[in-house]
């Protein structure tokens, strides 16, 4: 039996390792510091194993014969990306934890063609003078919002900031700093990622004036609360929760009338902000951007990566004079977005203008019928039978819009329900998450559920490979 000191002596030094021809090759490809780090990590692991008494001479010999492979593995792990693609089989279209809306192909192409080199981001090519970055999307928002508007409505202007939380902050700070903002108690929401209306209000320098109760707020509550310090009326989409039963909330039209009577701006945080008619996919109670502007809301704020289906952004659309004030606020400079966002947004908006909704992945997924999804699931199921431990059924279920859209908004779908004879549903879901790429699925009633609505057709082959790979499952 070898002593630990003898075992340690068997280990090569870092120097020895770095002179090994295979390691020299790695160094030429990945750089000396990263390779030296990987060597150190592998040797440290072996030392720890020896110290713990888990290696005898024979086992150490075996470990040393795999040393170069271990360094290679460690190098791959250390130099691999942390942010990676996953397969979303949850059926939640705007999954906040999975990056919300996937970016459209044409948007990626536009990012590539403009961001890989120089662009006219803030340069007016006609005059040769400095330009404004917002012109690139303002014209498209005008086309989408004003042309569909009633002719009597005032023209709108649009600016873009980093996300909708920033949009709300900028709107409140610009229009209500130092004054009161009236909000219903039923709308003091917290959205995921700790966006809370009262907190954002505080940061904006505006004073929250709550009215009504959690379940019932009347238009008279707003009216009574208006005083000489009132700067703004705020309506917030409840997004991720619902109040049902004995409830009351004034209509947007009533709030518009009240705001006009007192000459106060009415701002609506729409959250999702659909630019298309959700009734087309059978969702009837989710207000769109146009619905609000048509009724006369002065300013709406919404996310770029929720129902709009574009990049992360916060969009502020509304009356020109109010939006102009926000643009002039120095906070706008701090919250502005980069050229990648403008490129992706411009391309996404052009798809709306061309009425090419299918070019936007999130919209395309929403438009998929249950029959189309069932057809894909039926074609996939037989391919999984080579995995003998699986029992596969097709069952009816529901996909979710997600992303803090209407909480009740679901779309009918057909699910692949998998039971494994050897693994529990949770174990199976865990193994799927650890596959490459990770597959994210739902677990319900002891089964793993896969919803192909959110799986891109071109991912089905790799999904099949993962589900039939005997070494992972
Ligand atoms: C999602 C949401 C937000 C936050 O939007 P982000 O783009 O994630 O910053 C704010 N308000 C409402 C009502 C929302 O639904």
Image: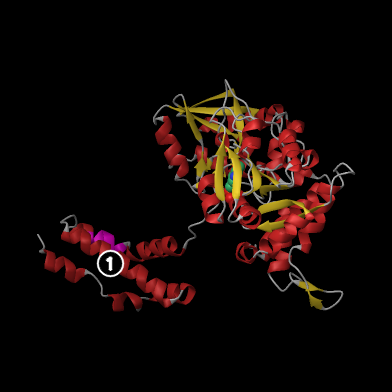
Secondary structure under tag 1 reads: helix
Q: Give the image's coloring scheme.
A: secondary structure
Question: Closest to the observer: 68 or 308?
Answer: 308
Residue segment shown in magenta: 60-65
Res. 196 visible in picture: no
Residue 135, percent from left and from top = 78, 63
Q: Residue at x 61, y 49 (%)?
A: 229
Q: Is residue 329 magenta-colored? A: no
Does 434 appear above or below 31?
A: above
Residue 375: x and y in percent read: 68, 29
Relative to 142, say whether 115 is above or below.
below
Horizontal relation, residue 246 to residue 18: left or right = right
Of all residues shown, which one is farthest toward the front? 228
Between residues 55 and 182, which one lies in front from this camera angle? 182
> Which residue is the extreme one toward the right?
151
Looking at the rendered image, the quarter that the N terminus falls into is bottom left
Q: Residue at x 71, y 27 (%)?
A: 371
């Amino acid at each position: 039996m070898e002593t630990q000191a003898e075992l340690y002596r068997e280990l090569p030094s870092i120097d020895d390792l770095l002179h090994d021809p295979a390691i020299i090759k790695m160094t030429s490809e990945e750089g000396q510091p990263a390779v030296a780090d990987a060597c150190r990590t592998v040797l440290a692991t072996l030392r720890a194993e020896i110290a713990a008494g888990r290696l005898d001479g024979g086992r150490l010999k075996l470990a040393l014969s795999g040393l170069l492979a271990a360094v290679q593995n460690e190098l791959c792990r250390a130099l691999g990306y942390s942010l990676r693609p996953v397969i979303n089989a949850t059926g939640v279209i705007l999954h906040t934890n999975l990056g919300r809306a996937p970016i459209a192909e044409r948007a990626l192409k536009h990012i590539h063609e403009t961001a890989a080199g120089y662009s006219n981001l803030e340069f007016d090519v006609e005059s040769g003078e400095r330009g404004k970055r917002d012109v690139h999307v303002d014209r498209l928002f005008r086309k989408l919002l004003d042309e569909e508007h009633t002719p009597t409505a005032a023209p709108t202007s649009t600016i873009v900031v980093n996300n909708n939380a920033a949009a709300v902050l900028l709107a409140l700070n610009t229009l209500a700093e130092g004054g009161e903002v009236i909000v219903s108690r039923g709308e003091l929401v917290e959205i995921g990622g700790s966006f809370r209306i009262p907190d954002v209000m505080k940061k904006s320098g505006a004073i929250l004036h709550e009215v009504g109760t959690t379940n019932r707020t009347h238009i008279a509550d707003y009216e009574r609360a208006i005083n000489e310090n009132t700067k703004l009326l705020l309506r917030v989409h409840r997004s991720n929760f619902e109040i049902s039963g004995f409830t009351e909330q004034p209509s947007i039209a009533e709030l518009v009338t009240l705001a006009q009577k007192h000459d106060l701006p009415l701002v609506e945080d729409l959250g999702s902000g659909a630019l298309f008619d959700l009734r087309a996919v059978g969702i009837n109670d989710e207000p769109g951007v146009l619905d609000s502007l048509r009724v006369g809301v002065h300013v709406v704020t919404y996310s770029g990566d929720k129902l709009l289906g574009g990049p992360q952004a916060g969009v502020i659309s509304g009356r020109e004079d109010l939006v102009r004030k926000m643009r002039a606020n120095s906070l706008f400079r701090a919250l502005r977005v980069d050229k990648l966002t403008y490129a992706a947004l411009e391309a996404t908006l052009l798809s709306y203008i061309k009425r090419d909704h299918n070019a936007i992945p999130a919209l395309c997924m929403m438009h998929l019928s249950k029959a189309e999804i069932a057809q894909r699931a039926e074609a996939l199921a037989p391919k999984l039978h080579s995995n003998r431990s699986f029992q596969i059924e097709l069952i009816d279920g529901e996909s979710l819009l997600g992303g803090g859209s209407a909480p009740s908004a679901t779309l009918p779908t057909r699910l692949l329900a998998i039971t494994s004879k050897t693994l529990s549903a949770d174990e199976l879901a865990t193994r799927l998450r650890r596959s490459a790429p990770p597959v994210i699925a739902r677990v319900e009633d002891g089964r793993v559920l896969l919803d192909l609505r959110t799986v891109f057709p071109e991912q089905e082959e790799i999904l099949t490979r993962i589900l039939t790979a005997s070494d992972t499952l």
